[in-house]
Amino acid sequence: MADKTVISEEQAAGNLQESSKAEIELVQGEEASGKKEGKKKKEKKEKKPLDKKAKKKRKKIIIFSIAGVLLLLIILKNVFGGNGAQMMVATTAAVNGEIEQTISTSGTVITEKTKSYFSEVNVKIGDVPVQVGDAVAAGDVLIAYDENDLNKEIELAQLKMQSAEGSYSNSVQTNNEKLGDLNEANVNLDVLEQQILDTEAYITNLENKIEKKKSDLAYEGALLQISLLDWQDQPGSDEYLNLQKLIQLNSYEQQNNKEIKSWQEELDAYNKMLTDYKEYRSEMKSQQSSAENSRLTSGAKEELEAENQTKEIEAAHTLESLEAVKGGLTAEFNGVITELSAVPGGVVQTGSQIVKLESTEEVMVEISVTKYDLDKIQVGQKAAITIGGKEYQGEVSKINKMAETNNSGATVVKTEIKLSNPDSDVVLGVEAKVVISTAQASDAVLVPVMAVNVDVDGEFVYVIENSIVVKKPVTTGISSDTMVQITEGLTQGEQVVTDVSSGLMEGMTVVAIPQ
């Protein structure tokens, strides 16, 4: 560079010689002085060993100084080469390898499965062995009802059931006589209608098969006639005679084909069957009409029957619900109690929620994906999840189709990561670290992220070719925190500049310093 001071190799060598001479003279002077001092001050013999060490130290300094200067000369020659100062740039070789692109974020542990338990009976609460936040296993009792109150309600439901059954039986007996004919007519007519449809479809199929076979034989005969015309100038030839025989055979087949005859016989039989079905249908419609008129006159009884049947169903449902809670409400799966409204001795109205259970077997992490990462994430991508210092595996299971605004005002899309291996250590509602693997590439050309630059023409890298800076446009693929994939524009082994200074330009002569 122009602002740097450069010395020549000859100047450096001269300095080395002058420095060496000065050092040698200094040592010689010190040795002579030491001898004179020895003569004058023989009484101080105890200091002589110290003087020898100092001399040896100075000799070593001289030797190292000479070696240092020589090394400097070599460096200066390689760096400057007599052509002026050159910029030194840090480079690294493009390599082939594997790369994985990830998205790192955090989210909240939630459950995929929730069960809200509603009271189906109006019975006093007995024992409540759980609290909000308790972990329970499938089959554990959550709520127990008062046994005495429960038995009273069961007896009352049984009485209602008996009453409903008696009323229902009477209604059925009354209406069965008048509805029997109608029911029979309806059933028979439905069956008959289906038989007619099936028969008509089969007849159509047979007709199509016959017409298709006749058409095929006629077409084959036409082709034979055409071929015969081609040989009519050679009436005695084998080809001509063979064609005549084939035409005769085809004509016979058109009149006497076994498949056509068989299908035709079957068709006649099914047409006869269809006629019979239609006649029987007319009779059944007459019966249906008569039975329908009879049913209309019994409308009041049918209404009573329906009412009694409703009462029976309601009584049966109540009794079933009471019998089902004899052992209390139990957990259907492993989970955590998140809501609880039941208290011992209290009465819970039918239909009200008394406990909520959230599963710890089907667990996910809900994250918020920004618009910058939305195009990278897909359902099915694997993820590493850290909860409380323990790592779990998972995958992207859901990406919402509607964005929302978070507390910071940024637009995000809620995304769910389902855990593949949850265990009892998982705590719902805590923060989880998530690393999603969004893309992988093997045998890829890789360079450090800082080696890729961007200008108005797009992405590019600087490479060093014969000490010359060359600008190469590139196309990038996926990237990690430190490396980026080059899909076009660069090959393995090329030296790319990793430390681009403001003064670096294409065409410059530089010294590459591999890192």
Image (spheres, helix red, strand yellow):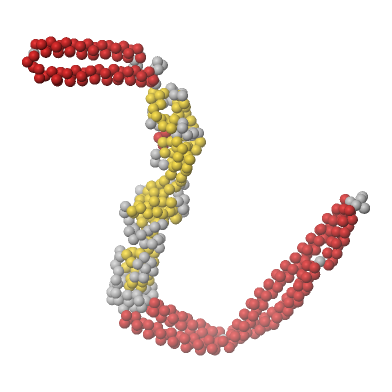
What residue do we see at 41% from left, 46% from top?
Answer: 102
- Name the image quarter holding the N terminus: top left
Residue 229 place in picture, x, y as percent: 88, 52
Is 396 on the left-hand or right-hand side of 293?
left
Residue 230, relative to residue 53: is it above or below? below
Residue 159, relative to residue 459: is it above or below? below
Residue 301 place in picture, x, y as percent: 53, 86
* Nearer to the camera, 93 or 384: 93
What residue do we see at 78% from left, 73% from top?
Answer: 265
Is 178 on the left-hand or right-hand side of 506?
right
Residue 45 place in picture, x, y as percent: 9, 17
* Nearer to the camera, 446 or 314: 446
- Image mark count: 0
What residue do we see at 43% from left, 22% from top?
Answer: 509
- Name the image quarter holding the C terminus: top left
- Residue 173: name its quadrant: bottom right
Q: Report if residue 266 is visible in the image.
A: yes
Residue 374, relative to residue 215: is it above or below? above
